[in-house]
Image (tube, grey):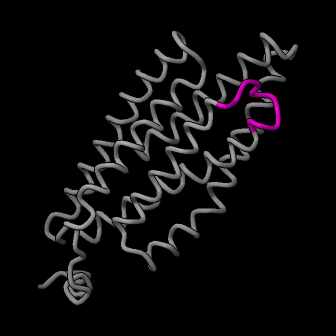
Amino acid sequence: MARADLAIVVAFMSLWIKNYGTEHGGLSGAEALAKAGAVVGISQMVALLCAPVFGWLGDRMRRQDLVVLAQVVAALAYLSTLLVSDPLGPGMMLVAVLIGVGEIAAITTAGPLLAQQAPAAVRGSAFGVHTLCGAAGVMIISALGGALFDAWRPAGPFVVAGVFSLAVACFGLAVRRRVTARAEADVAGEAVPAA
């Protein structure tokens, strides 16, 4: 999900604002794209500023709980686009801020959980599969979201991302008690491979 979040924000938020600006806002294409760049830029700045917060939380919470929390935050942020009627208005700025928080929450929390759970012998492979699944998520959510953008409404891609985030959160809640952190000594001992 996390990899798809960035693609959705950059591609579809820009397209939504550009289309609305040229069709309803009386803006030229360049002006609409400048407005889109500002909104996406704010979203990404918020993401940048919030990244350390989720790193800090990752050291203080059970990582599986943090992943669930991150997915809920991301879902609420993406689904909040359903409330936007004018993407050139101040409501879109608030949604962009929420999306920045949700996006970085999803991006920064999965890796530490995977590192905690995957044994050192297969950790590289586990991260490879994680990245492969991320690429598949980008393609699936972009395709479904793009179809909904055209057939339903511009918030469609964000709704798809929100629904997938909710699904991940529900799965996380279902399995969270079964996830146990590996012993700290074991994790520390794996930092240096045996000769």
| For residue 103, above or below residue 49 | above
- Would residue 35 be counted in the magenta stretch? no
Q: Magenta part of the protein: which range?
A: 83-92
Q: Position of residue 155 (x, y in %)?
A: 58, 25
Q: Position of residue 2 (x, y in %)?
A: 43, 47
Q: Is residue 162 left or right of residue 170?
A: right
Q: Using the image as rendered, state which of residue 39 and residue 88 is in the foreground.
A: 88
Asked where in the image residue 150 lies, by quadrant, the reply is top right
Q: Is residue 86 left or right of residue 187?
A: right
Residue plotted at (62% across, 54% down): 47
Q: Quadrant of the C terminus?
A: bottom left
| For residue 64, above or below residue 195 | above
Q: Position of residue 12 (x, y in %)?
A: 58, 27
Magenta part mainly helix, strand or loop?
loop
Q: Quadrant of the N terminus?
A: top left
State the count of labels.
0
Residue plotted at (69% across, 39% down): 40
* Residue closest to the far right: 26
Q: Position of residue 66 (x, y in %)?
A: 42, 65
Q: Using the image as rendered, state which of residue 43 and residue 135 is in the foreground.
A: 43
- Would residue 84 be counted in the magenta stretch? yes
* Residue closest to the far bottom: 185
Residue plotted at (58% across, 44% down): 77
Residue plotted at (19% across, 66% down): 178
Q: Is residue 152 left or right of residue 165?
A: right
Q: Is residue 14 left or right of residue 72?
A: right
Asked where in the image residue 94 lies, by quadrant, the reply is top right
